Image (tube, rainbow, N blue to C red):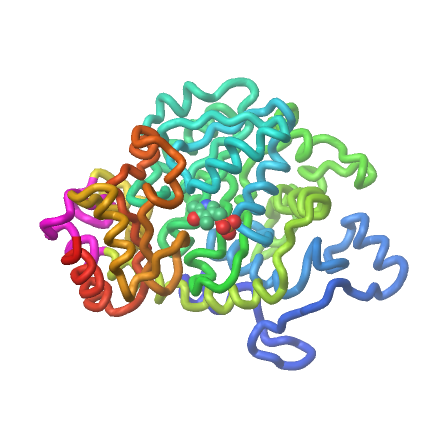
Amino acid sequence: MTQGFSTRALHAGAAPDPVTGSRAQPIHQTSSFVFKDAEHASKLFALQEFGDIYTRIGNPTTGALEARIADLEGGTMGLATASGHAAQLLAFHVLMEPGAKIVAAKQLYGGSINQLGHAFKKFGWEVEFVDIGDHAAVEAAIDDKTRVIFTESLANPGGIVTDIAAIAAIAEKHGVVYVVDNTMASPYLCRPLEHGAHVVVHSLTKFIGGHGNSIGGMLVDGGRFDWKAHADKYPTMATPQSFYNDLVFADGFGALPLGPEGQEVDIAFAIAARAFSLRDLGPALSPFNAFMIMTGCETLPLRMAKHCENATTVATYLEGHEKVSWVRYAGLAGDDYHALAQKYCPNGAGAVFTFGLKGGHEAGVKLVESVELLSHLANIGDTRSLIIHPSSTTHSQLSDAQKTAAGAAPDTVRLSVGIEDAADIIADLEQALAKL
Ligand SMILES: *Cc1c(COP(=O)(O)O)cnc(C)c1O
């Protein structure tokens, strides 16, 4: 029988160290690994045997974290990266070619909008942003050049839930890969691979690490995409790669007997992302950060439950406040996204949401300057409660119309509710709201 989520969050991918008996995962703070002999070395380099060579490509500490997150997401293999953005870069590097196109949700983390909309342009990768709630628009945006659909599960700036199964059905119909950024939900709340996504990416910096102390990322291979059937679209996966003696990743790693009972699993995407994209582009996670994030991951279920409980309490309080005009949190019964949240995130709708102040831009500035317990900063998913007024910070470059279109209208405040006592979070908001 498969173990429960909390047990796996503690144990998956790690065991007492066979040499020293160390119970915690040791930090293998080394750049490289000694070969047993020349034959061992040559097999490792030719991908004929798994093992560590050099920490840019793999390391036992990051390997333990990779196995744990892949297990929690229900994927076949994970690949740790230096940041969430690095995980996105590597996933797209495997899937895209110059001139190819990404169909992406308009409702993405602002950093991802920049990455896809600006930085990726230099690779010749095109992107079309669409409203993720408009499934007809998603389908209409797909053309012969499209290789990827990219959405978040719970979408930034908060309060939006993607209908993952509906988007997955569109991806399936058109034979394109569906990549989901599951950062805001974490696998405790939502597992996109179970709803038909092909690949999951994470910023481990947020809820999985959970303590606001380490940057990291992960991509997880769902092992379900038929690369050979779409070889013309995904040459990196399904055509011979000259830098590995003409190896075809989908052939070499598409059916390895690595399942719990020796079942064949497909890890070809994760291997390509490591052996080609990570090896050559280089954004590896440090073993120390892998250790910090793994320690955080052990309490993910406890923290997420408390984050969601507090978020619901705080959102309910704000809904009843005279200076607040609206609250957008899918955990509230009256919210537009409540039904989707119950389908995809039955254990809670996350801890990040937005609300509007009747006093507009000025009130938003005053509020973030008046809080004492809450931290005014640009992050989410810390144990501590965080607040930001997008109109005066992350979105300050935009016109009011652009701000509103991005879900960051001048009156909008975003909270990432922490795991303090809810009464103290409310007391701090109460005293700050009183100053408006
Ligand atoms: C923070 C974040 C990212 C980027 O992650 P980094 O670790 O900061 O590179 C991507 N997606 C979402 C939803 C995020 O919140």
Q: Does any portion of residue 202 appear in the rendered image?
A: no
Number of residue marks = 0
Question: In the displayed image of the protein, which residue is found farthest to the bottom?
Answer: 21
Q: Where is residue 170 in the image (x, y as percent from the top left)?
A: 43, 27
Q: At 30% from the left edge and 62% from the top edge, which residue is drawn?
A: 374
Q: Does any portion of residue 224 appear in the rendered image?
A: yes
Q: Quadrant of the N terminus?
A: bottom left
**Residue 92's quadrant in the figure?**
top right
Q: At 47% from the left edge and 42% from the top edge, which residue is drawn?
A: 111
| Image side of residue 168 versus residue 337, left or right | right
**Vertical order, 338 against 287 (above or below):** above
Question: In the displayed image of the protein, which residue is found farthest to the right?
Answer: 38
**Residue 272's quadrant in the figure?**
top right
Q: At 50% from the left edge and 31% from the top edge, which residue is drawn?
A: 117
Q: At 31% from the left edge and 47% from the top edge, which residue is drawn?
A: 389
| Image side of residue 85 versus residue 38, left or right | left
Q: Position of residue 317 (x, y in %)?
A: 15, 56
Along the line of sight, the residue nearer the viewer: 260 or 313: 313
**Vertical order, 193 against 208 (above or below):** above
Q: Is residue 43 part of the magenta span, yes or no?
A: no
Q: Where are the magenta residues, as a range?
A: 312-335
Along the line of sight, the residue nearer the viewer: 326 or 201: 326
Q: Position of residue 82 (x, y in %)?
A: 59, 53
Q: Is residue 313 part of the magenta span, yes or no?
A: yes
Along the line of sight, the residue nearer the viewer: 284 or 188: 284
Q: Position of residue 406 (x, y in %)?
A: 34, 34
| Image side of residue 174 versus residue 278, left or right | left
**Vertical order, 212 against 338 (above or below):** below
